[in-house]
Image (cartoon, rainbow, N blue to C red):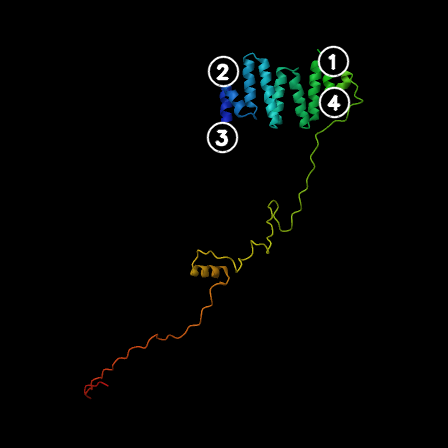
Amino acid sequence: MAAVQDFNYKVALASGLRELQAGRLRQAEQQFSYLCAKFPDAVGGYRGLAKVRMEQADRPGALTVLRDGAAKLARAGQHDGVVALLTEALQLDPLDLAAHRRLAAAHALAGELDAAAAEYARFAHALRQTDPSGAQRDVRYGLDAFGAVPGLLTLAAELGIDTSAVAPPTRPATPPRVEAPPVPAGAIPGVPRRGRRDKGTSADREPAADAAVDPRLGAQDALDLSARSGAADPVAPEPAPPQPWAPSAPLPSRERVPEPELDASEDPI
């Protein structure tokens, strides 16, 4: 399924770029809008749609596309995509306060405090030419959010900001490492051990000798069932020893027929 989605993404992206290069903005917008809807965790659709907005002379629309795309990627945990989209947004408008704050926050959440301080330095230097008080205000905001990061301290010294009461830098807490339990001798790592079965449980005991027999079974079937279960039949009596056969009534007597006397010459014996 992932391979099919990747194939569809590449086909739609290539088609959108081809339409954009050919100047067919409406068709390109359709392709990139499809990518934004079907693949919200990828940067290609947002980048392409922002380029379409720029070709339509809609710079605010392009900035909106890039900021919204960065917000969706941030919810999906795509840090690299967030940084790429917000960097492009700041290339379109270096003084975009929303994109600047989001980019610095993205670096800080990833533990990249030096990169966050560099973004604050870039924005302050760009802003101090037209709004010195705004540059100082933004640096104070960065110091309150991230603490005494060396880059921000240097920038604050350039702008004449007092940093004596600034707290030390706050870095993301690292979750404690959980040690795995020791592997018993003879066990295979990564393979769960099977529980030991109790010999006294009902699952391991043989069926009781006085177990109930289905009344629907015949006498012979009940005997066979008892023989297979290894238990004696408590109902069937023991067989009697065999007795010699005797006729129930006397047999009728038959008259003996006298044999003819043979001549000595005719008798072979």
Query: Mark on residue 133?
Result: 1
Query: Mark on residue 26?
Result: 2
Looking at the image, do the residues carrying marks 2 and 4 touch, with CB atoms under 8 Å apart? no
Label 4 secondary element: helix
The mark nearer the N terminus, 3 or 1, is 3
Categorize mark 3 by other alpha carbons within 10 Å: few (<14), some (14-19), many (20+): few
Q: Is residue 255 left or right of residue 188?
A: left
The mark nearer the N terminus, 4 or 1, is 1
Q: From the image, tell me which residue sits under label 4.
A: 144
Looking at the image, do the residues carrying marks 3 and 1 touch, with CB atoms under 8 Å apart? no
Task: Give the percent coordinates (x, y) of residue 262.
Answer: 20, 86
Quarter of the view holding residue 254: bottom left
Q: From the image, tell me which residue sits under label 3.
A: 4
The mark nearer the N terminus, 3 or 2, is 3
Categorize mark 1 by other alpha carbons within 10 Å: few (<14), some (14-19), many (20+): few
Query: Mark on residue 123?
Result: none
Task: Give the percent coordinates (x, y) of residue 107.
Answer: 67, 25
Label 3 secondary element: helix
The mark nearer the N terminus, 1 or 2, is 2
Q: Is residue 2 left or right of residue 114?
A: left
The residue at the point 71 percent across, 19 percent down is 121
**Identity, as a three-letter code, of the amino acid under mark 4:** Asp
In the rendered image, the vertical position of residue 196 relative to residue 85, given as above or below: below
Task: Give the percent coordinates (x, y) of residue 214.
Answer: 47, 56
**Identity, as a three-letter code, of the amino acid under mark 3:** Val
Looking at the image, do the residues carrying marks 4 and 1 touch, with CB atoms under 8 Å apart? no
Looking at the image, do the residues carrying marks 1 and 2 touch, with CB atoms under 8 Å apart? no
